Image (cartoon, rainbow, N blue to C red):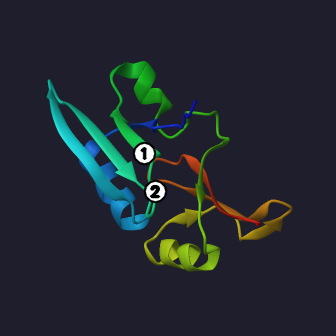
């Protein structure tokens, strides 16, 4: 048996603003943007070099979902963006205005720093140790 996470859903307020931020600030590729009718779209993004896992942008509907934008996990780190070159990506992200909550640090598992996406979700930029 073979399984993998195909996509992770992320609540957003606006498809186009989110697409612009993730493609510019993080260098993600827009994989799919399909109109589903009624204002809904299927929007999939992929980090550079990713072969399988995608980020599905889900526009929030209603007050309950809207209240979760930027806080899907109660303030904890939500997603981990692994990289093969921490310094390269950290510097690129800083140059594109990405807000980091902390300076890079060395942990037993690798080099890491927490950053925020355009809605305030906490992410790890992580270069795992071999």
Q: Is residue 69 left or right of residue 13?
A: right
Judge by depth and name the residue closer to the eye, 129 or 41: 129
Residue sitting at 52 percent across and 74 percent down?
A: 94
Q: Does residue 54 appear to the left or right of 13 in the view shown? A: right
Q: Residue at x 44, y 20 (%)?
A: 64
The image quarter containing residue 82 is bottom right
* Crowd class of label 2 (few under 14; some 14 to 19; many from 20; radius 10 Å): few
Position of residue 20 measured from the top left corner of the image (x, y, whole percent): 29, 58
Q: In front: 64, or 49?
A: 49
- Residue beneath the point at 63% across and 73% down: 86
Q: Of helix, strand and loop, which one carries label 1?
A: strand
User: What label sits on residue 106 in the rendered view?
Assistant: none
Q: Secondary structure at mark 2?
A: loop
Dot 1 and dot 2 residues touching (CB under 8 Å): yes
Task: Check disc 1 and report the residue beneath it.
Answer: 54
Give above or below for 103 relative to 61.
below
Task: Give the left or right position of residue 130, taking residue 74 as reference.
Answer: right
Picture quadrant where residue 7 is located: top left
Question: Could you give the CA–CA distance between mark 1 and mark 2, rounded to whole angstroms?
Answer: 8 Å
From this view, report whether residue 88 is shown above or below residue 110.
Answer: below
- The residue drawn where x is 14% and y is 24% is 38
Question: Which quarter of the figure is the C terminus placed in?
Answer: bottom right
The residue under label 2 is 50
């Amino acid at each position: 048996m073979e399984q993998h996470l195909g996509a992770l859903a992320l609540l957003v307020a606006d498809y186009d603003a989110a697409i612009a931020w993730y493609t510019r600030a993080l260098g993600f590729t827009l994989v799919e943007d399909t109109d589903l009718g009624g204002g809904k779209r299927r929007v999939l993004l992929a980090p550079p070099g990713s072969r399988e896992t995608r980020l599905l942008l889900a526009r929030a509907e209603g007050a309950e979902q809207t209240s979760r934008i930027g806080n899907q996990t109660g303030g904890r780190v939500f997603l981990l963006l692994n990289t093969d070159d921490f310094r390269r990506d950290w510097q690129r992200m800083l140059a594109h205005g990405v807000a980091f909550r902390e300076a890079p640090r060395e942990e037993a598992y690798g080099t890491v720093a927490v950053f925020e996406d355009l809605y305030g979700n906490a992410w790890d930029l992580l270069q795992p140790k071999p």
